[in-house]
Image (spheres, rainbow, N blue to C red):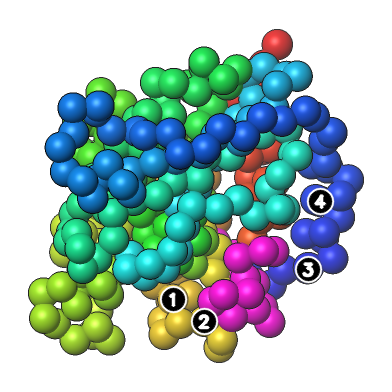
Amino acid sequence: MKNSIILLFLLSVFSLNAQNRYEFKQDISYIEQSEKDEYRRERCKLDVYYPTDIKDYPTVVWFHGGGLEGGSKHIFDELKNKGIAIVPVNYRLSPKATHPAYIEDAAEAVAWVSKNIEDYGGRADNIFVAGHSAGGYLTLMVGLDKTYLAKYGVDADQLKGLIPISGQTNTHYTIRKERGLPMDIPIVDKYAPLNCARKDIPPTLLITGDRHLEMTARYEENLHLEAILKALGNKNVKLYELQGFDHGSMAIPSCFLLLEWVEKYKKKTE
């Protein structure tokens, strides 16, 4: 879908701008205190960036990219001071951990937010999940395969929205690498969001860069998922292709679409 970058900037400036006071709590462990695994204790931490002068705000849980092999939690400036909370998450990485460790960590982090965000002034029923690249893949796996969140007593259907930004919808290439399989040949198994497609999912915004500049078939993978989700009866699913942007540069303009999606589907407060 063709998009106007001017429109994105207007949305950010006029529709979603807010001036609030914020707190930033860092390196909060989201796993059990009894955990003995040193790598989990090191990596399984998150930050909470939240407004202090409003209540019941939406929260976006954010998973960083890096191919499931690198990267660290961060917050894009474009998402700051917008009247929402951002919770960036670290998770275990390959090859020190292997599938499905990073998906399990992502689910535990979302569950932690669901059970604790009200202590910061947010709402457990006003949570969105998002991420770029590998983070987009984790977003889809946690939101589409309900078993990961169900382990922690959280219903994935109660999330307010999923916003995967250039995420793989086939089985992630790092999982193929871990199995000794070619990274450039697609596989669709239980670790593929496509294989977890179902009806009645949260409102889902799929975003990719330009199909001619993106990673191989990244736009087409997302187009495939959009078609399947809609065929299953999901009406609130939309795919944006950010023309002129490659895999890395599309992350920043995607923030404005994310904010628009949150504004559209957030829990309305009285």
Question: Where's residue 141, x and y in %?
Answer: 31, 51
Residue at 72% over, 68% down: 3
Q: Nearer the viewer, mark 3 or mark 2?
A: 2
Residue type at tag 1: Arg
Residue that badge 2 annotates? 214
Residue type at tag 3: Ser
Q: Distance between the residues labelled 4 and 3?
A: 11 Å
Residue type at tag 4: Leu
- Which numbered dot is residue 120? none
Is residue 53 in view from this perspective?
yes
Q: Is residue 205 above or below residue 128?
A: below
Residue that badge 1 annotates? 218
Q: How far apart are marks 2 and 1 (CA)?
A: 6 Å
**Reading the chain from its start, which is encountered first: label 1 or label 3?**
3
Residue that badge 4 annotates? 11
Secondary element at image label 1: helix
Crowding at label 1, few (<14), some or many (≥20) Cα neighbours within 10 Å? many
Q: Which of marks 4 and 3 is in front?
A: 4
Q: Distance between the residues labelled 1 and 4?
A: 26 Å
Secondary element at image label 2: loop
Residue at 84% over, 65% down: 6
Is 18 left or right of 28, judged from the image as shown? right
Question: Where's residue 100, x and y in %?
Answer: 18, 54
In reply to whether residue 111 is colored magenta, the answer given is no
Is 170 left or right of 16, judged from the image as shown? left
Range covered by the magenta-colored residues: 239-253
Of 157 and 229, nearer the camera is 157
Residue that badge 3 annotates? 4
